[in-house]
Image: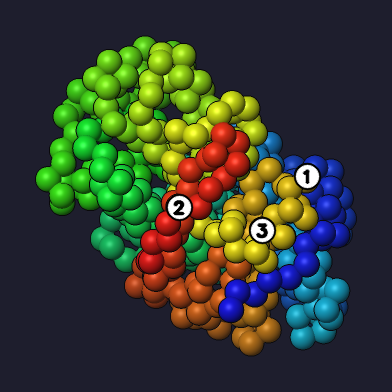
Amino acid sequence: MKRIVSFVLAAGMALSMAACSSSGSSTAQESSSTASSATSATEESSGGEILIGCLQDITGSTSSLGISVQAGAQAAVDEINANGGINGKTLVMNTYDTKGDVTEAVNAYITAVTVDEVSLIVGPPVANIANAIKETSEGYDVPVVGLAMDPSCQLKEDGTPYKNMFGLQPNADSQGEIMAAFALKNGYKTFGVLYNQENSYSVSLLDPFLDRLAEDGVTVDDSMIVAFGAADTDYKTLLQPLVSANVDAIYCPNYTQQLVAIVTAATELGYEGKIIAGLDAAPAFNTTYGGDCSNVYYINNINTEDPEIAAKIAEIEDTVSAPNKYFLGYDIVMAAADAISKNGTDYEALHSAFENLSYEGITGTITIDPATHMPTGMSMFMYTYDNQTPVMLEQFAG
């Protein structure tokens, strides 16, 4: 049974902290100036506090994701403390703003582990940021428990895991395959692709989708695979060959802001086929786009038609823009608290606990494969919209 809890008060407090960086939360810049007040790991053990970090894009182009993760994580912190903390100790979480920038992210990470001496970091959902810190993280003894889907965020080129990098949602290989399987099952035969070649998230979702199509004998001509970069913003020109070919579906594994621009351009070009996107077409894509989203199909890690989950979303929807990221942030902290309660903050014990993690969360049963530091067997869900309203279509087992 999913572990469902009340979020109302905690959600409001968490978003207030993300926006204002109030007590228990600091940006990367603030953490240096407040280092004297931050409790070291040694002092925490004797002083009754356990300090963790939350490394997120609080500002920048993907801030809606980072703020939502932080809000869910802080909601979990507040709930844990309201119920007596972890073995009687108060859980404290400092937030570090990456600003969506890889250099800022590395600097913030170093501040968290060397100045503030956090025991664990709630990692980012953005692959570019996770990839930026993975090499640096090898030099420290602090687990980074995050959401980045690109397998290279967790795995080295030789196939072994970075010692501290853990992912708690299905990776891009799994998600790309599921989206392709869904498309094939629903009779789509011709495809175009529009992806960001400068973004790890977008690139990581490309080959798994194409490979799954190929298993069923469906190939996508190179002329129908269109790559773009940050400087390319004329989406009508990029989309024109795909729209002119009248493909059944256009695969767009891109972030929310780009998806909004792409769907707008496709609509203006008169495209009447389907648009298949990743997690970032989940709410708040619909409200950000503002128009009819009925031709958009996307993958999600929560079943919003589960009555209990739907009730929790209703409680937080006025303050949280991306509920799926909120629940992921919540699950990370709850899983971390469970591990710490059993093993303490000793690095070796905590690291081993995450390598062998099995935790029943809101987003499903999270079972980590120690060989990859990624989950196995987690279900995902395919959705579309009825105008602006999300509609769950099918569950895919992990």
Specify which label sits upstream in the sequence, 2 or 3: 3
Mark 2 residue type: Leu
- Identify residue for label 3: 310
Indicate the position of residue 32 as horizontal and vertical percent values.
Answer: 76, 48
Q: Nearer the viewer, mark 1 or mark 3?
A: 3
Specify which label sits upstream in the sequence, 1 or 3: 3
Q: Extreme left residue here?
A: 217
Determine whether the residue tagged by mark 1 lies in a helix, strand or loop: loop
- Identify residue for label 1: 318
**Measuring 73% from the left and 70% from the top, which residue is drawn there?**
5
Q: Quadrant of residue 343?
A: bottom right
Specify which label sits upstream in the sequence, 2 or 1: 1
> Is 43 above or below relative to 212?
below
Residue 280 as seen in the image, left or right of residue 82 = left
Q: How many marks?
A: 3
**Measuring 68% from the left and 36% from the top, which residue is drawn there?**
59
- Identify residue for label 2: 393
Q: CA distance from mark 2 to mark 1?
A: 25 Å
Mark 3 residue type: Ala
Indicate the position of residue 224 as horizontal and vertical percent values.
Answer: 23, 26
Asked if residue 383 can be seen in this view, the reply is yes
Mark 1 residue type: Asp
Q: Residues within 10 Å of mark 1 (few under 14, many from 20)?
A: few
